[in-house]
Image (tube, grey):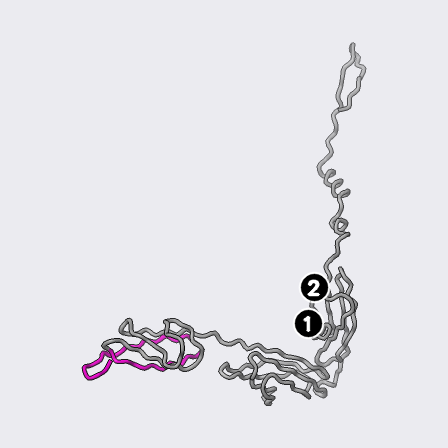
């Protein structure tokens, strides 16, 4: 610590130490942030993430990237293919628009497509629907007009909003909205969610009665899942009349009570 000699009015010399004035903590923090590298500076040598934000005017247009449907704009694609890509926007009532766009690596790329209206032409143009279903073989109708069975390609359909009805053997019927755009081919993939089997249970008297299926390969278990359909069962117990049971499984769990009748001397259990 620095020091010096000072002459006093009294005899001799006195030795004095100068105290160092402490630096305020806020000033130290300011100096630290001033001379420390910022996060942006520290990461200048690292490449950023490549993204592609697709916007379309008007909103709600479907966009294809390199011919692959990607969804309804606006949407963000992370890690898109680098270089030139083909963007195609289609929207009912507007002229379809195709543009090439250059995607630059390590940048947030933004592509904006502006479509021209086809006012007055709605309903006068035709388009195509390619309908795929899982499982296949659904009976199709568009606005109650039969189309055939899936998979199929339906052409010369009037542009506009339509209702597509599907019927699957044993699975019922469903109706979904579809859109036809003039001059465009739109593929629709429909996955039919098969209903989960419902639980089947019989409570029998007397307890311990044996139950077997007559038209089903699985052994009977109380509370077992069964798909929709009609089932024939047989319940038997020594000393009781063997009884056949018919059950119609529907959309709900099935639970029933069955009482076997005691066998008389003239009846065969």
Q: Which residue appears at 53% of the width and 83% of the height?
A: 168
Residue 6 rendering spot, x and y as whole percentages: 80, 17
For label 1, the residue is: 70
Q: Residue 141, located in which quarter of the rendered image?
A: bottom right
Instruction: Depth check: give the residue in front, 119 or 200.
Output: 200
User: Which secondary structure, mark 2?
Assistant: strand
| Image quarter (top left, top right, bottom left or bottom right) of the N terminus | top right
On whether residue 104 falls in the magenta region, the answer is no
Q: Mark 2 Cα within 10 Å, few/some/many (few <14, many 20+)?
A: few
Direction right: furthest residue:
7
Q: Which residue appears at 77% of the width and 23% of the height?
A: 2
Residue 46 rendering spot, x and y as whole percentages: 75, 53
Mark 1 or 2, nearer chain start: 1
For label 2, the residue is: 78
What are the residue bounds of the magenta stretch? 240-269
Q: Is residue 140 above or below residue 67?
A: below
Q: Is residue 268 above or below residue 55?
A: below
Residue 214 rendering spot, x and y as whole percentages: 36, 81
Numbered label attached to residue 46: none
| Image quarter (top left, top right, bottom left or bottom right) of the C terminus | bottom left
User: Which secondary structure, mark 1?
Assistant: strand
Q: Mark 1 Cα within 10 Å, few/some/many (few <14, many 20+)?
A: some
Instruction: Depth check: give the residue in front, 101 or 178.
Output: 101
Instruction: Depth check: give the residue in front, 219 or 60.
Output: 219
152 horizontally vs 50: left or right: left
């Amino acid at each position: 610590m620095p020091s010096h000699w000072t002459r006093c009015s009294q005899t001799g010399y006195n030795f004095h130490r100068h105290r160092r004035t402490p630096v305020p903590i806020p000033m130290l923090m300011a100096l630290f942030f001033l001379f420390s590298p910022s996060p942006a500076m520290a990461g200048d040598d690292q490449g950023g993430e490549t993204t592609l934000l697709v916007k379309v005017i008007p909103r709600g247009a479907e966009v294809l990237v390199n011919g692959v449907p990607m969804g309804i704009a606006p949407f963000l694609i992370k890690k898109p293919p680098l270089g030139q890509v083909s963007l195609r926007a289609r929207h009912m009532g507007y002229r379809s628009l195709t543009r090439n766009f250059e995607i630059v690596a390590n940048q947030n790329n933004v592509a904006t497509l502006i479509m021209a209206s086809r006012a007055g032409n709605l309903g006068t143009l035709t388009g195509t629907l390619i309908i795929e279903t899982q499982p296949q073989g659904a009976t199709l109708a568009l606005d109650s007009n039969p189309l055939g069975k899936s998979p199929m390609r339906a052409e010369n359909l009037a542009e506009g909003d339509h209702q597509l009805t599907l019927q699957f053997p044993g699975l019922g019927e469903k109706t979904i909205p579809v859109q036809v755009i003039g001059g465009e081919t739109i593929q629709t993939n429909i996955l039919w969610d098969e209903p989960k089997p419902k639980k089947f249970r019989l409570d029998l008297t007397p307890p311990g009665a044996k139950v077997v299926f007559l038209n089903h390969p699985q052994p009977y278990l109380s509370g077992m899942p069964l798909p929709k359909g009609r089932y024939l069962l047989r319940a038997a117990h020594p000393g009781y009349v063997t009884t056949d049971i018919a059950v119609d499984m529907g959309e709900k769990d099935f639970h029933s009570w069955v009482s076997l009748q005691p066998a008389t001397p003239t009846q065969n259990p």
